[in-house]
Amino acid sequence: MSMQNSTNGTVADVPLPVAQAPAYTAKDFASSADVRWCPGCGDYSILAQVQRTLPDFGRPKEEFVFISGIGCSSRFPYYMNCYGFHSIHGRAPALASGLKVMRPELSVWIVTGDGDGLSIGGNHLMHILRRNFDCNILLFNNRIYGLTKGQYSPTSEAGKKTKSTPFGSIDHPVNPVLLALGCESSFVARTIDREPKHQQEIYRRAYHHKGSSFVEIYQNCNIFNDGAFEQLTDKKIKSDNVVGLEHGRPLIFGINSDKGIRLDGFRPVVVSLADGSHSADDLLVYDETNAELAYIVARFSGQPGFPTPIGVLFATERPTYEDLAQDQLAVALDTFGEGDLDAILNEGDTWVVA
């Protein structure tokens, strides 16, 4: 922006001062609403880490928008001191798509759950990922329907006994990160509610990525599915059950960092580093830009003997939907002009489309 300034008969462009975002803290992003999740719910941790991360981005609160559907996770916008929508079941991606294409300068975040996002909202989730809107999608996965009191969800493990599956679920569970990769999301990651620093790093990566950012968050529901991820959070055993993904680093895990993963062709194999038969040089070095590798590693989850991967599984760059839409709009305006909507609506009872 600039203003015209006349001095001694000359005209110069004088830049207007650029508004600087206030120096926020986490408290600035906390609303006055009482947080009404069950005591001990993993959602509290996710909320706290998001509120701690947003001040790092140096932009006004008014430029952040949180959109949710239905479920425990979907209370999120009430607790954020910024703009937000609590929409209808599974439809948060549809609202976010419309907002982002009309207001591409906003930072749009979608908060959903394994039920809201993968059941009734699965279709909408698929399309926002493939279209590559520049939105950040946080999917809370507790492998249960919490708000409706303990029915099995799309991510519940086979054999899960719940109020709606008293003899055990016979469904094959959805692997959310594998689904996101199949929809060609340009950024796919996973974190855990009890890993606050890891959460913050993943949220920063998601924010700075231009395109659809999908983050699955393992979240404990201590009322209806307590301990669902205990193997990944118990300090005594989690190192044997979790492998952290770092770009350019070999896949090493274990309490004593004595296990690793190597590829035998396209088949991953867990090997020991303790007996001297293998070294770090033999192991798979992770490349987060390799989609084929991301598919292989995403399938570790739930496989006997393999650790669950957390971190960034995949990141790539491609044009966003809103940028392509704005480009088309510019071409249309150059070709046809702005037009007169009132004249079109009143020209007669029918319209001829050339």
Image (cartoon, rainbow, N blue to C red):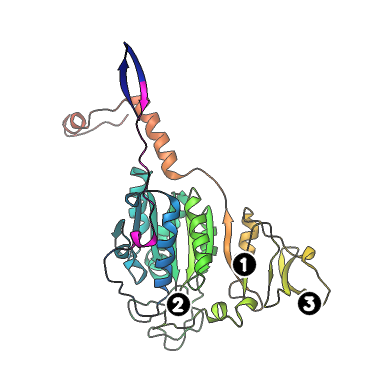
Q: Is residue 330 above or below residue 112?
A: above
Drawn side of residue 350 relative to residue 22, left or right: left
Q: Which structural element holds mark 3? A: loop
Give the prevailing secondary structure in the magenta stretch.
loop
Q: Which residue is mark 1?
A: 244
Q: Which residue is mark 3?
A: 274
Return the x and y of residue 259 as percentages of the image width and height.
72, 74
Query: Residue at coordinates 29% horizontally, 58% vertically from top-left?
Result: 85
Q: Residues within 10 Å of mark 1 (few under 14, many from 20)?
A: many
Return the x and y of residue 281 as percentages of the image width and height.
79, 63
Give residue 81's quadrant in the image: bottom left
The magenta stretch spans residue 20: yes
Mark 2 and mark 3 lie on one chain; the one further toward the N terminus is: 2
Return the x and y of residue 173 as percentages of the image width and height.
50, 74
Q: Is residue 144 above or below residue 167?
A: above
Residue that lies at the very extreme toward the top in this rendered image: 9
Q: What amino acid does circle 3 point to?
A: Ala
Judge by depth and name the residue closer to the eye, 22 or 81.
22
In the image, the segment drawn in magenta is 13-30
Q: Which residue is mark 2?
A: 220
Mark 1 and mark 3 lie on one chain; the one further toward the N terminus is: 1
Query: Residue at coordinates 30% horizontally, 74% vertically from top-left?
Result: 36
Q: What amino acid does circle 1 point to?
A: Gly
